[in-house]
Every structure is written in structure tokens, then in C-alpha cells.
């Protein structure tokens, strides 16, 4: 009760303060994401559904931003082609929801067979439309308001703190001793504990923390050696341990891929630490190793025990490695080829009957969505809907890489590397989970994209000898 009271007072103060400084209000929204999803957090204020503490602050920030930016004579400086891509991204989301609302027969059929609540118009609009924009808007507001070095530093610190606090919550909930249990046991415990005690699904946390580790690591370019030991090392340690405790194999692979890219192209000397890291993981986190190799070592063991291993046994190993996704993906791809240009609208997997078919044919295997963000977006929106979204993320990766490789100013390296880490983590993990519809786990990524686009614009100003208060003290 005391915690809720203190939170209410903080939100009340920030809501008033947002009308004075909407930029900092938006940054506080980012930090509060670390606790907003916690099950203990109130889901409503005064009994009004959806009006929780975070949403109340969000509404004040939005209205303060729209009201004050004109008074402050702030112009929208987003590059025209990015603005067009964001508009098309938003338009596609709106159309997909409208198509879903116009025909929910497949979802209703599934509910009639297996039970559940019949979808209603207002909850559908809130969940699939309003929330999509809500999770992305803080990043756009921060992009619009970040005009000075001081503002940039504040936004970056709040983002780093959000990931750090999430990591601490994961460690507190799972306990470090869980790294000593079996890989299967780690997965089951994480699935049961993390949603209940942190509020995010273990798969989402694994993706978020794999990128957050390298975001924190990139900020070392900002600090001296003493600050590295004081801030960066503890931050990286917490996020790595938290990621390990999620039991997310995709997160493990994503972390390793990002590490290989960063070290090969920027910090090669850290490759010397790889053998020591592997020894440490083998010695102190056997569950991490077992979880990562699940379905691979079993296949090798089976081949040693039985030289006449069957094709069916290999299929079972493939199912284990992909957590059953090989069952769904061929069916999803077949459905995409049947409607390649415009797809089927939101919730296509359930609405065209694939979820029901898989549950009937494969003894209860549940696939409400394809568990692959690329296949899901193509299935929902087709090639026409996919092109602008894919191009947008390709440009974000391109711009981030350009900043990361620019050695003239540390702010370029930190911003480019940090954005590359979060967006690439999302895109890599997307082969086994995630989706392109913005969700709560993507708030940090959208904020970092906003900061990256801002720094890129300010770099262009600096290169053109125009006034900028963000790019200072070039190397």
C-alpha cells in the first residue's frame, strides 16, 4: 500500500511537471517501464479501465508535447523519407485492424471449440491499435525534444536505468542458483516466475536484455576507466546474468551474434576474453549451456547410441531445437503464397484457421501466431504491407552502422552502437518470436531509434557548419 501511494504521488508530480518539461516527462515514462508491467501495479485509476498510472502520465506528456512544442517554436525535423515510412507503417497497422474487425469468423470458431472470450470491438481497438502507437510514441517525442547534450544524456541515462532495473528484477525473481539446475528446469521456472514477478514474458526479456548488454557496453566510449569499473562492468554483469536466467535460447544466440559483430569490427581485443567467458559459463551456468544446446546434443547422443537413427527422430530433434516452430512455419508459408500481396489482416494465424488446424492435427500444439515476425507480418499484411516496414528497419540499421563507425565523436559511437544493438537484437530474435506491431518490450528500442535519428540529423548540421547544441567537443 505504501509503495502504491508513493508511486501515485510520483506520477502526480511528474504529470504536473510534464507541462513544464514534456521531454523529461517522456524520459520518465521510459524508466517507469521497468516496473509498469509488474503484476502488483494498479491496472486502473478510480475504476476506469486502462487508466493506470503509466497511461495517466503518458496522456499528460502527450497533451503537454502537442500544446507546448508550438509555443517553443519546435519544428519537426524528421527526414521526409523516414516520416513517409512511419506514416505507411502506421497506416498498415490501422488497415490490418480494420480488416480483422470486419471478419473475425476464424477467431470466433476457435473460441467456440476451445473456449475463451469473444473479441469485442473496443478491447480489440485498444489492444491492437491504441497500444501499438502508445509504445512507439515516447521514442518519437524524445526525438522531437532532444536538442541539447544535456537532454541527450538524461534520455540515455533513463533508458540504461530501465534495462538495469529490469535485470535486477529478473535476478531477484529467479535467483542465481537457478543457473545450476537443468536447462529444461530453467526454462520452466522462468516461464512460471518471470511473468508473475516481473510482468514480461521470458522470451521478450531475453531479447531485450541481449541488446541491452551491448547498449550498456557501447556507453563505455563515453566514460573513463574509473567510471567503466563503476558503471559499465556492473551494468553488463547484471544484464548478462538476467539474460542467462531467462532461459531464452534466441536471446543467447542474439547476444553472441551481436558480440561477434561489435568485437570483430570495433573492439577486437575483447575477443581474447572469449575462452575465459566460455569456461565461466561451463563452470557456473551449466543450465545455460544445456538450454542452448537442447535438441542438438540429444541428436548427437542418439546417433551414437543407434547408428540406424530414423528420419522421424531427426524431425523430433528439429522440433526440439525450434520449440515446435517447424510444425507451423511450412503451413504459414503456404498461406502466405495464397494471399501474397495483401495478406489476411491482423490475427491471420487464428482467423484463417491455422491455429485450430495445428491444435487438431498435432495433439494440442498451440500457435496463435507464427512465432516469426517476418512470417507474421507477411501473413497479416502481404508483400505490399511488408515493403515499407522492411525498408524502414533496413535504413535504421544502415544509419546506426554509419554512426557507430564514425570516430570523430564518442556520441556517434555510443548512439549508433546502442541503436544497432537494440534493433538488431529485435530483428535477430524475430526469427523465433516478436512481431513488428510495437509492444511494451519495444519501448526502449523505439527510444534509441529516436535518439539515433536525432544524432544523425545533428551530425549533418555540424558537417554543414550549422548551429547545433548536441554535437560538441568533437574528437
Image (cartoon, grey):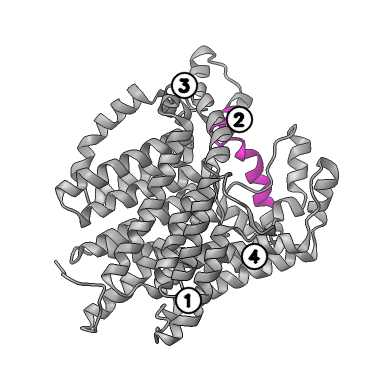
**Which disc, if any, is residue 331?**
none
Q: CA distance from mark 2 to mark 3?
A: 27 Å
Residue positioned 54% across, 59% down in the render = 54
Q: Secondary structure at mark 2?
A: helix
Residue positioned 84% across, 49% down in the render = 109
**Left or right placement of residue 2 versus residue 335 in this view:** left
In percent of width and height, residue 40 lies at 57, 44
Q: Main secondary structure of the magenta part?
A: helix
> Label 4, on which residue?
129
Query: Which quadrant is the C terminus positioned in?
Result: bottom left
**Disc number lying in front (1 or 3):** 1
> Label 1, on which residue?
65
Labels 4 and 1: the sequence-earlier one:
1
Q: Quadrant of residue 366?
A: top right
Check the image and report above or below for 10 versus 164. below
Q: CA distance from mark 1 to mark 3?
A: 49 Å
Q: CA distance from mark 4 to mark 2?
A: 38 Å
Q: Secondary structure at mark 4?
A: helix
Which of the pair 42/345 is nearer the observer?
Answer: 42
Residues at marks 1 and 3 touching, judged by CB atoms closer than 8 Å:
no
> Label 3, on which residue?
181
**Which disc, if any, is residue 315?**
2
Q: How many other residues sit within 10 Å of disc 4, few (<14), some (14-19) or many (≥20)?
A: many
So how many labels did they put on this image? 4
Q: Is residue 321 magenta?
A: yes
**Disc number lying in front (4 or 2):** 4
Amino acid at each position: 500500500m505504501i509503495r502504491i501511494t508513493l508511486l501515485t504521488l510520483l506520477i502526480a508530480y511528474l504529470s504536473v511537471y510534464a507541462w513544464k518539461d514534456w521531454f523529461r516527462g517522456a524520459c520518465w515514462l521510459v524508466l517507469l517501464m521497468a516496473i509498469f508491467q509488474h503484476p502488483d501495479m494498479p491496472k486502473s485509476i478510480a475504476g476506469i479501465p486502462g487508466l493506470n498510472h503509466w497511461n495517466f502520465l503518458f496522456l499528460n506528456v502527450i497533451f503537454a508535447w502537442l500544446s507546448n512544442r508550438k509555443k517553443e517554436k519546435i519544428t519537426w525535423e524528421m527526414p521526409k523519407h523516414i516520416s513517409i515510412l512511419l506514416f505507411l507503417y502506421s497506416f498498415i497497422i490501422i488497415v490490418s485492424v480494420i480488416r480483422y474487425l470486419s471478419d473475425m469468423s476464424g477467431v470466433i470458431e476457435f473460441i467456440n471449440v476451445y473456449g475463451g472470450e469473444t473479441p469485442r470491438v473496443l478491447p480489440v481497438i485498444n489492444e491492437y491499435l491504441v497500444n501499438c502507437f502508445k509504445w512507439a510514441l515516447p521514442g518519437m517525442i524524445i526525438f522531437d525534444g532532444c536538442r541539447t547534450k544535456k537532454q541527450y544524456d538524461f534520455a540515455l541515462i533513463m533508458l540504461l536505468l530501465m534495462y538495469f532495473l529490469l535485470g535486477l528484477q529478473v535476478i531477484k525473481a529467479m535467483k542465481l542458483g537457478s543457473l545450476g539446475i537443468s536447462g529444461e528446469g530453467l526454462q520452466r521456472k522462468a516461464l512460471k516466475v518471470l511473468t508473475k514477478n516481473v510482468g514480461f514474458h521470458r522470451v521478450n526479456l531475453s531479447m531485450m536484455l541481449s541488446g541491452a548488454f551491448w547498449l550498456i557496453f557501447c556507453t563505455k566510449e563515453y566514460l573513463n576507466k574509473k567510471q567503466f569499473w563503476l558503471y559499465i562492468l556492473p551494468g553488463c554483469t547484471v544484464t548478462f546474468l538476467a539474460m542467462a536466467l531467462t532461459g531464452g535460447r534466441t536471446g543467447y544466440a542474439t547476444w553472441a551474434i551481436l558480440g561477434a559483430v561489435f568485437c570483430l569490427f570495433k573492439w577486437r581485443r575483447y575477443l581474447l576474453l572469449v575462452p575465459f567467458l566460455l569456461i565461466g559459463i561451463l563452470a557456473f551456468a551449466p543450465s545455460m549451456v544445456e538450454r542452448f544446446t537442447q535438441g542438438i546434443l540429444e541428436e548427437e547422443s542418439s546417433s551414437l547410441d543407434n547408428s540406424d537413427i530414423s528420419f522421424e527422430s531427426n524431425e523430433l530433434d528439429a522440433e526440439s531445437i525450434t520449440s515446435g516452430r517447424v510444425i507451423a512455419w511450412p503451413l504459414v508459408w503456404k498461406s502466405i503464397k495464397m494471399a501474397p500481396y495483401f495478406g489476411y489482416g491482423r490475427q491471420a494465424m487464428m482467423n484463417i484457421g491455422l491455429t485450430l488446424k495445428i491444435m487438431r492435427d498435432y495433439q494440442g500444439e498451440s500457435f496463435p501466431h507464427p512465432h516469426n515476425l517476418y512470417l507474421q507480418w507477411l501473413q497479416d499484411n502481404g508483400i505490399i504491407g511488408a515493403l515499407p516496414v522492411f525498408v524502414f528497419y533496413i535504413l535504421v540499421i544502415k544509419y546506426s552502422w554509419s554512426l557507430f563507425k564514425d570516430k570523430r565523436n564518442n556520441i556517434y559511437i555510443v548512439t549508433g552502437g546502442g541503436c544497432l544493438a537494440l534493433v538488431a537484437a529485435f530483428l535477430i530474435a524475430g526469427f523465433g518470436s516478436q512481431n513488428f506491431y510495437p509492444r511494451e518490450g519495444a519501448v526502449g528500442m523505439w527510444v534509441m531509434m529516436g535518439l539515433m535519428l536525432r544524432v544523425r540529423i545533428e551530425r549533418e548540421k555540424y558537417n554543414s557548419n550549422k548551429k547545433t547544441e548536441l554535437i560538441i567537443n568533437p574528437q
